[in-house]
Image (tube, rainbow, N blue to C red):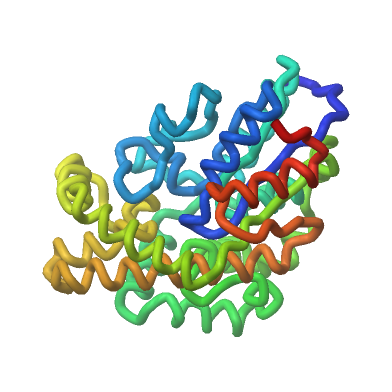
């Protein structure tokens, strides 16, 4: 493990989807002069799924190095603990070169796990996971949530009914170990020594404007060939129940291709899914400790200037 002796802040730019995290993260890296971005988005990690992931283009990166993006094969069952380990190694490596890590992304669970490490859970039982997947597909994700509410109400308090990957994982842990996830999580590892240096800024744009952006962006994904991308991935053997194709923006396309809904319905449902996801992201970050909210979108000059002032960067 690379040791870091830096005492400098590590920045994290978080917030709901379509709020402009990439733009303000890149501008922060350029403003600092030595910033390097570490992806903190659970979908952008996957290779070969592009259109609905909002991965930054080379032009949007503006020459700023980006890490932990577009590097995991889509068939891999990549868990939050895997990301936390990879992010820990990358933060240490970036700081060892005298650079400033900037975590950018809206997956709050990733960020929390980095600051408050989870226990070492059991290896995934694929047969058990498949059973819960079949239950979810038949009865809906809310049914799984009701199960975890009965089994482990303390864990359920920190989960959302439609956040089925984490709800499913909580159920898997219980049925594999016989112990509640909430109890096992008390056996967390110690936070890394740099955890207290992570300064988290969360974007808070106007909801009406945010939802309009979400609707427009989701529609463009379909116009730009999202259905064809999913067809190609399925031909390569990627299952509809994979983590990659189970993410918002992709699962409704799979339903369309299975004949379960029309294309128009797939677009509308995707827009609704992403709006609901944005609501959950707002709720998540409201419960997080030691975060600073930034009013507005990340591509707004006023929002950026507010950030520069908060962290003591001089105006250009």
Q: Which quadrant, please, contains the C terminus?
A: top right
Q: Quadrant of the N terminus?
A: top right
**Drawn side of residue 30 relative to residue 308, left or right:** left
Q: Is residue 211 above or below residue 239?
A: below
| 120 shown above or below 246 | above
Horizontally, residue 250 falls left or right of residue 92, namely: left
Camera-side residue of 201 and 295:
295
Is residue 134 left or right of 293 when viewed as pictured?
A: left
Give the residue at x 21% y 73%. Answer: 265
Question: Who's the residue at 12% across and 69% down the image?
Answer: 259
Residue at (63, 75) in percent of width and height: 156
x, y percentage for residue 101?
A: 68, 31
Residue sitting at x 59%, y 35%: 27
**Residue 53 placed where, x, y %?**
38, 47
Q: x, y percentage for residue 282?
A: 60, 67
Tag count: 0
| Residue 221 in the image: above or below residue 190 | below
Q: Nearer the viewer, residue 53 or 122?
A: 53
Q: Is residue 30 visible?
A: yes
Front residue of 176/212: it is: 212
- Quarter of the figure with residue 194: top right
Residue 58 screen position, x and y as percent: 40, 27
Q: Is residue 90 visible?
A: no
* Nearest to the observer: residue 278 or residue 216: 216
Q: Residue furthest front?
A: 316
């Amino acid at each position: 493990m690379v040791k870091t002796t830096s005492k400098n802040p590590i920045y994290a730019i978080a917030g709901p989807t379509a709020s402009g995290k990439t733009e303000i993260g890149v501008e922060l890296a350029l403003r600092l002069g030595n910033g390097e971005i570490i992806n903190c988005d659970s979908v952008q990690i996957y290779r070969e799924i592009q259109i609905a992931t909002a991965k930054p283009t080379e032009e949007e990166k503006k020459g700023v190095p980006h890490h932990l993006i577009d590097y995991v094969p889509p068939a891999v069952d990549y868990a939050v603990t895997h990301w936390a380990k990879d992010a820990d190694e990358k933060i240490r490596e970036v700081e060892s070169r005298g650079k400033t890590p900037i975590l950018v992304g809206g997956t709050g669970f990733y960020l929390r796990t980095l600051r408050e490490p989870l226990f070492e859970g059991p290896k995934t039982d694929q047969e058990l996971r498949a059973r819960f997947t079949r239950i979810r597909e038949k009865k809906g994700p809310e049914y799984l949530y009701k199960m975890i509410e009965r089994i482990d109400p303390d864990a359920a308090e920190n989960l959302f009914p439609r956040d089925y990957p984490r709800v499913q994982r909580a159920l898997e842990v219980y049925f594999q170990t016989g112990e509640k996830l909430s109890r096992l999580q008390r056996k967390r590892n110690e936070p890394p020594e740099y955890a207290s240096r992570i300064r988290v800024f969360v974007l808070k744009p106007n909801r009406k404007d945010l939802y309009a952006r979400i609707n427009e962006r989701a529609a463009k994904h379909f116009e730009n060939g999202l259905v064809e991308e999913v067809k190609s991935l399925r031909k390569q053997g990627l299952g509809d129940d994979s983590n990659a194709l189970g993410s918002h923006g992709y699962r409704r396309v799979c339903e369309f291709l299975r004949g379960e809904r029309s294309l128009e319905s797939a677009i509308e449902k995707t827009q609704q899914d992403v709006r609901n996801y944005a609501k959950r992201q707002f709720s998540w970050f409201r419960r997080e400790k030691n975060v600073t909210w930034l009013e507005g979108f990340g591509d707004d000059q006023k929002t950026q200037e507010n950030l520069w002032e908060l962290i003591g960067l001089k105006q250009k």
